[in-house]
Amino acid sequence: ELKVEQNPLFLSMQEGKNYTIYCNYSTTSDRLYWYRQDPGKSLESLFVLLSNGAVKQEGRLMASLDTKARLSTLHITAAVHDLSATYFCAVVKAAGNKLTFGGGTRVLVKP
Amino acid sequence: DAGITQSPRHKVTETGTPVTLRCHQTENHRYMYWYRQDPGHGLRLIHYSYGVKDTDKGEVSDGYSVSRSKTEDFLLTLESATSSQTSVYFCASRWTAENTEAFFGQGTRLTVV
């Protein structure tokens, strides 16, 4: 059974500094997603990563995928308050259909 | 934004009553999913569908059933609601192509009293 683990669970950030969220998964994957969720809202898609070495960037967020290590990272550059949210990774097992989520990382960016 | 809607958005029901939540998508997506979200548990998969009349269980399927008679609709039924099923329920859908996103509905807040 596919297991997806994120760490840390909570990240208190200072504005202007850089941070990384980690997403480990237990079996071979077809694709990996990153989502953002604001309190009381639905999930917003950030990135879809498909292949080993894939890197995608949008603004201050950059996601990468290492399929050999079964690890994805979400890097936040020069954090700003607007990035406060909960971030989830989700994985589709290779040749499978289920979309399995990690536990989420709650990010709070303080001035 | 992808056309995926959930109904109702909020519901309060009594213990022991059946409840059906509806997910409707207009994107002709093959895969559809139902999740529940609870504090400290992230999103947990209840059931999913990989085509019309093709469904399978997720990790927390006990007490829930689903049906998909049309591509666009995926129904989640709580056969006899319990207080432990008080949660926020999210529906998602995606196409088969590798580089497509999985889109989420707005969520349904269900309270079982």
Image (cartoon, helix red, strand yellow):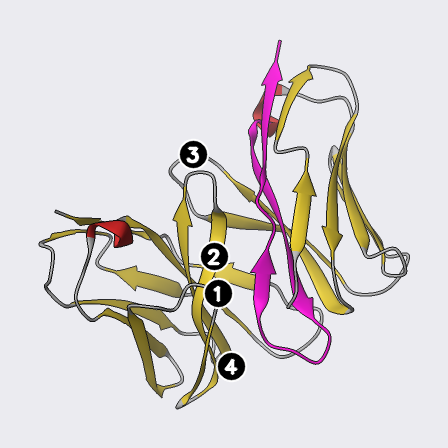
Q: Of marks 2 and 1, which one's residue comes earlier in the chain?
A: 2
Q: Which residue is mark 2?
A: B44
Image x and y of residue A5, in percent: 67, 48
Magenta stretch: residue A91 in it? yes
- In the displayed orientation, state which residue is furthest to the top: A111
Residue type highlighted by circle 3: Pro
Q: Earlier in the sequence, mark 2 or mark 4?
A: 4
Q: Based on the displayed image, in which of its 4 quarters is residue B57 positioned?
A: bottom left
Given the image, what chain letter belongs to the residue carrying mark 1?
Answer: B
Q: Is residue A38 magenta?
A: no
Residue B57 appears anywhere in the view: yes
- List the residue tagged with mark 1: B59
Q: Which residue is mark 3?
A: A39
**Is disc 3 surrounded by few (<14), some (14 to 19) or many (20+) residues within 10 Å?**
few
Q: Are marks 2 and 1 in contact (CB under 8 Å)?
A: yes
Q: Residue at x 74, y 60 (%)?
A: A26
Label 4 to label 1: alpha-carbon separation: 21 Å
Crowd around label 2: few <14 · some 14–19 · many ≥20 (10 Å): many
Q: Is residue B40 above or below residue A49?
A: above
Read off the chain for label 3: A
Name the amino acid type tagged 1: Glu
Three-letter amino acid code at the position of disc 2: Arg
**Dot 1 and dot 3 within a common chain:** no
Label 4 element class: loop
Of badges 2 and 4, the one in the foreground is 2
Q: Are marks 2 and 1 on the same chain?
A: yes
Q: Are labels 4 and 1 assigned to the same chain?
A: yes
| Magenta residue span | A84-111
Which amino acid type corresponds to the residue marked 4 in the rendered image? Arg
Mark 3, secondary structure of its residue: loop
Which residue in the protein does label 4 denote?
B30
